[in-house]
Image (cartoon, grey):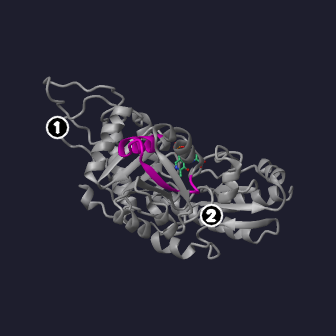
Amino acid sequence: MSISQLQGFATKAIHAGEEPDFRDGATGDVVVPVHLSTTFARTKVKTPTAGYEYTRSLNPTRKALETKLAALENANYGLAFASGLAAETTLLTALLRSGDHIVAFDDLYGGTKRLFNNVFVNYGVEVTFVDATGVSTVEKAIKPATRLIWIESPSNPLLKVCDISAIAKIAAANGLILVVDNTFLSPYFQKPLDLGADVVVHSSTKYIGGHSDVLGGALLLNNHEYYEKLQYHQNAIGAVLSPFDSYLTLRGVKTLALRMRQHQQNAFRIADYLSKHPKVTRVIYPGLETHPQHALAKAQGTGFGGVLSFEIVGSQSDAEVFLEKLRVIALAESLGGVESLIELPSVMTHSSVPKEVREQVGISDTLIRLSAGVEDVDDLINDLEQALTHV
Ligand code: P1T
């Protein structure tokens, strides 16, 4: 079996990178082994006999995951890192120099903004944040020093959707690298490289791992020159995914298709329930026709994902009461796990973004973000219902 024979997404998620090895002495495992060895012996000084030298540079378990993730994103190359932020750091270090400028979406994971504003700024990298739902706004922010455009679609936590193909055209016309963080939809629902993006970023901690038990990040791309630079920096910086975490991620990602379908189904039911609730003032979910970019989301992907945000009546303390009364849905940062997770971005995931910037972007103190898990949806709705009675 070769990867080219693996056509369907679910088939690739299960088999890509893990074809059984029938060579002499091999066992035919259907699951890639966890290669814990930190170093690999060779018979000749000058060449690594089996292709592996030292596990930071290349590890067979990590390689299997990188191959699988590349297959899922329709990418030629994949690299796996110790976290989403480790992947982002490696990307910025490999592809940018001091004096370079980034045009970034103003609604991004708080930790990504912190990385730009509080870390890379010290190395001379400047960032302009813009509302990337407006394609011309992105274009206008480009300067002579701009090297890269960075977007999330849908964004975290406001679920704004931007036109990836249109922005890719602008990036190409200006010789810029378009980076799309595809964490929220996963490759099951959206493939940014097919839409013209240059590099896809994932926090594989989320849907790809899927079980809230392994941190990780990934970069997927087609450009060979960028891949060589990224691979060099992955080894030089060393923020690689461990063999055991690679194994856990491999195990998790096999059910991505099944999980994404259920996450989405539950998200739709919850969005519908919340939309009709008198104590809920606003529901943001790209799957709803009321979402400002619903048509675009429908056109550029095959689904809308499992994350929704909403606001309830009252103040931040009412939101806190509601969140603390939930019993099935866990009050926790992160998303994309089989268990439903809920959080208050202003205090939790986006607390590192200054209040005035949060307000400018639209992250109010009462905005709540919910990652619908794959539990029985009635249990989730009953939990929301009982918690809302306390507001
Ligand atoms: O947590 P880490 O694996 O380092 O990934 C960072 C990251 C990158 N991109 C997006 C879109 C993300 O959502 C994240 C992490 N986000 C959370 C922990 C959160 O609760 O939003």
**Magenta-highlighted residues:** 86-108
Q: Position of residue 327 (x, y in %)?
A: 75, 49
Residue, far right: 390
Q: Quadrant of residue 11?
A: bottom left
Q: Position of residue 234 (x, y in %)?
A: 36, 38
Which of the marked residues, 2 or 1, is nearer the chain's N terminus? 1
The vertical placement of 294 against 5, above or below, is below
Residue type, label 2: Ala
Disc 2 to disc 1: CB gap under 8 Å: no
The foreground one among 208 and 28 is 208
The residue singled out by tag 1 in the image is 24
Q: Is residue 33 visible?
A: no
Question: Which tag is nearer the camera, tag 2 or tag 1?
Answer: 2
Residue at horizontal 36%, vertical 29%? 36
The foreground one among 16 and 191 is 191
Residue at horizontal 82%, vertical 62%? 313
Give the secondary structure at mark 1: loop
The foreground one among 266 and 30 is 266
The residue singled out by tag 2 in the image is 267
Point out the image quarter for the N terminus.
bottom left
Residue 300 lies in the magenta-colored region:
no
Q: Disc 2 beta carbon < 8 A from ligand 1? A: no
Structural crowding at the residue carrying mark 2, measured as other residues with C-alpha within 10 Å and reported as few (<14), some (14–19) or many (≥20)? many
Left or right position of 246 against 158: left
Structural crowding at the residue carrying mark 1, measured as other residues with C-alpha within 10 Å and reported as few (<14), some (14–19) or many (≥20)? few
Residue at horizontal 38%, vertical 61%? 197
What is the count of numbered marks? Answer: 2
Give the secondary structure at mark 2: helix
The vertical placement of 110 against 372, above or below, is above
